[in-house]
Image (spheres, rainbow, N blue to C red):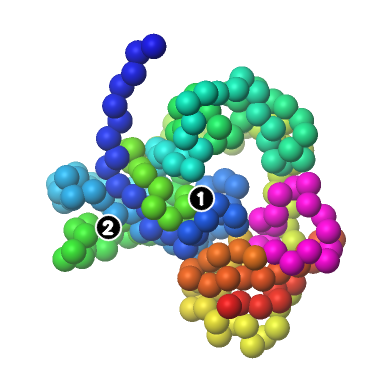
Amino acid sequence: MEETVIKIIARIRSDFPTKFGIPRQSGIVENLVSRIVFEPEYRNPDALRGIDGYSHLWLIWQFSEAVRKDWSPTVRPPRLGGNIRKGVFATRSPFRPNPIGLSSVKLVGIEETEKEGSVLLVAGADLMDGTPIYDIKPYLPFTDSHPDAVGGFSDPVRERSLQVEYPAELTGQLPADKWEALLGILAHDPRPSYQHDPERVYGMAFAGKEVKFKVDGDKLTILDII
């Protein structure tokens, strides 16, 4: 089988050291800001000339925690409860012949740093900290946006919103921007869809903290932030 080599041009720096809690799709939590740090070979400011004219970007990246030698023609999408199989090319499962992901993010700005060169600040990324990025392309609204598109079996299982409650004293455990991002993440229910135990306490690593919470019906309660 023919193979090719794809170079890693950058890595993302996000508030997610593990996979649990990462939004299931890009753009769901707009308050979630991440940094794209280029590899030394690609820290040439000329490579970003004109990028500030775009509001959104496409990121092409590697499912670095899902690299495997074999592949399966069918997968079990978590949003369908994990017990219904669909064709791998009809899903966005990370378990693919090539572990490549695609995300649309909002370009917040460009941060000029002495150590890391030009760093892209993006909002709405669904990537774990350190994820390798293969390429960055501009999002073109006149051709990339399709308002009349059909979402297949994903349409009936769109993200539901939870009511998030918490003790007032916990708000000081995170900076204001991180707190708003956390609320957005929790509102979209980070649990696997097959888990419904109202007494189970979940722990999610976020922004250097451990967030403890429970879910009962449509209400999520933050118990502690450690």
- Extreme residue toward the bottom, this view: 169
Quadrant, the C terminus: bottom right
Judging from the image, what secondary structure is the residue with disc 1 in?
Answer: loop
- First along the sequence among labels 2 and 1: 2
Is 181 within the magenta? no
Q: What stretch is highlighted in magenta?
A: 186-202
Judging from the image, what secondary structure is the residue with disc 2 in?
Answer: strand
Which residue corresponds to the image point at 34% horizontal and 50% vertical from the top-left? 11
Gap in angstroms between the C-alphas marked 2 and 1: 18 Å
Front position in the image: 121 or 150 = 121
- As drawn, the label of residue 119 is 2
Q: Which residue bears the numbered disc 1? A: 126
Which residue corresponds to the image point at 16% horizontal and 66% vertical from the top-left? 114
Front position in the image: 170 or 68 = 68
Q: Residue 32 in the image: x percent, y percent?
A: 50, 61
Front position in the image: 6 or 90 = 6
Among the 4 quarters of the image, the one containing residue 214: bottom right
Which residue corresponds to the image point at 66% horizontal and 78% vertical from the top-left? 224
Q: What amino acid type is highlighted by mark number 1?
A: Asp
Secondary structure of the magenta portion, mostly?
A: loop
Q: What amino acid type is highlighted by mark number 2?
A: Val
Which residue corresponds to the image point at 55% horizontal and 82% vertical from the top-left? 173
Q: Residues within 10 Å of mark 2 (few under 14, many from 20)?
A: many
Among the 4 quarters of the image, the one containing residue 87: top right
